[in-house]
Amino acid sequence: MKTIVRNPFDREPVAEVPLVDWPQIDEWLSEAQLLHRDRHGWLAVHERIAILRRAADIMRERAEDLALQIVREGGKPLVDARVEAGRAINSVDLCVQALRDGGGHEIPMDLTEAGAGRTAYTFREPIGPVVAISAFNHPLNLIVHQVGPAVAAGCPVLIKPALETPLSCQSFVSILHEAGLPEAWCRFAPCGNDIAERMVTDPRTAFFSFIGSAKIGWMLRSKLAPGTRIALEHGGAAPVIVDNGVERAAVIASLLKGGFYHSGQVCVSVQRVFVPAAELKDFANDLGRAAEKLVVGDPADAQTQCGPLIRTEEVDRVERWVDEAIAAGGTLVCGGSRLSDTLLSPTVIVDPPESSKVSQEEIFGPVICVYGYDDIDLAIEQANALPYAFQAAVFTDRLSIANHCIQSLAGSAVMVNDHTAFRVDWMPFAGLRRSGLGVGGIAYTMADMSIEKMAVLNWPTAAS
């Protein structure tokens, strides 16, 4: 069995990747379990640091090739693919930094008579075999965020990439091996969904890292073996509150990036924008005019700003959702139609009904919905009404409104005068409610993939 990797723009074959069957996965899981149990065979911290540093150096030498590979398999515009490759390299560097900054701490024992005379400290140990499943939309940096911390923490890891975009994963695993990581410590494991489920739910899996759809993530969580720890990163329908009288041009420029970056195929992409009702018409028209100027086309062209959706079926779905919202009473400002079997025009809809899919579900396409409000608290209430909560944003010149939104919006992070898709790789990144479980970000993932172990020493006193 194999998967055929196709360029999302023209659907031409890019590569063929053999799929791994269960007997091979079974062997690798047993191998990973034995590696973890053999404490004398663990890779020393200095060895892990050296491997990760060499891997980052190799990636720097091949940064343009890695970016072009992201373009070919994932359809991300070249300008953004280059940014992703740079972020991935930085993420490997962050793994090294986290190892240097990490470690344990002293626990005070003499706070009560019961603990007097004892000394205690903590240190970190790897949790055990890690199984990771990743998404297509950042095919290199997401892999680094799952595999890099596992290697840094000292865990053997099996990684299943999205079958649409396995090549960046394959490249990163190969680079780690080239940098000196023994192959048994990191296995490239492209496989079918049935095999992946067996791998994830196997009792030898100590930690499961998942980036992808909420439906699949929560289903797999329900089937985990007892004791398996987990981190889930899903998506949402990110809300933005725009305050009265904010300078419009800067807001629109930010929303364009946050809503149409990678054609909206981002888990924290700008989706629902709440604007004062008196400004709604002019704001939406300005946003629509700006969206119409975006360059849509071949992602390999350095001028392209919006590329294809990952599958033609996704073009069908997003177009159907837009049509349904317009039929139900939403006003189409721009876009709303396909440019080809793989491209959708950037779309702005005003006041789609709250019951419509574009108002209720994650679009994961190039669509921004704009709603008018008279009372900012009612806008916040609408923003918080969905069962998803990830990153939110507010644009305002008033500190009081910024603080009010920071306190009131349901997201795990609230951006002030920035779009919801803002992220740097060292910050915490956490979906709440149905949007996920646990905290992403290099150092936070490394903490998840390790155990803080404590030693309590009760030495005899000199008098005894």
Image (cartoon, rainbow, N blue to C red):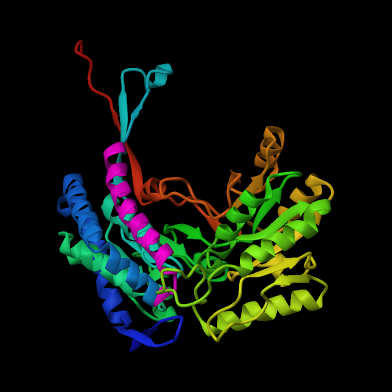
Bounds of the magenta segment: 73-101
* Residue drawn where x is 67% and y is 33% of the image: 399
Q: Who's the residue at 73% across and 61% down the image?
A: 284
Looking at the image, how many numbered discs can be counted on the residues?
0
Quadrant of the drawing holding the C terminus = top left
Identity of the residue drawn at 25% across and 60% down: 59
Measured from the top left, where is residue 81 in percent x and y?
39, 65
- Please say whether residue 206 is visible from this viewpoint: no
Instruction: Residue 181: give x, y in percent of width and height.
Output: 18, 60
Left or right position of 68 against 27: right
Horizontally, residue 234 falls left or right of residue 372, namely left
Is 93 included in the stretch rendered in magenta?
yes
Front-most of residues 82 and 100: 82
Q: Is residue 214 magenta?
A: no
Examine the rendered structure and indicate whether residue 412 appears above or below residue 159.
above
Q: Is residue 453 above or below residue 312?
A: above
Hey, which quadrant is residue 74 in on the image?
Answer: bottom left
Front residue of this view, candidates 382 and 105: 382
User: Where residue 392 sits: x, y (%)?
Assistant: 62, 50
Question: How far across and how far down the image is residue 374, in percent?
Answer: 84, 49
- Which residue sits at x=30%, y=75%? 25
What main secondary structure does the magenta stretch of the protein show? helix
- Quadrant of the rendering where the N terminus is positioned: bottom left
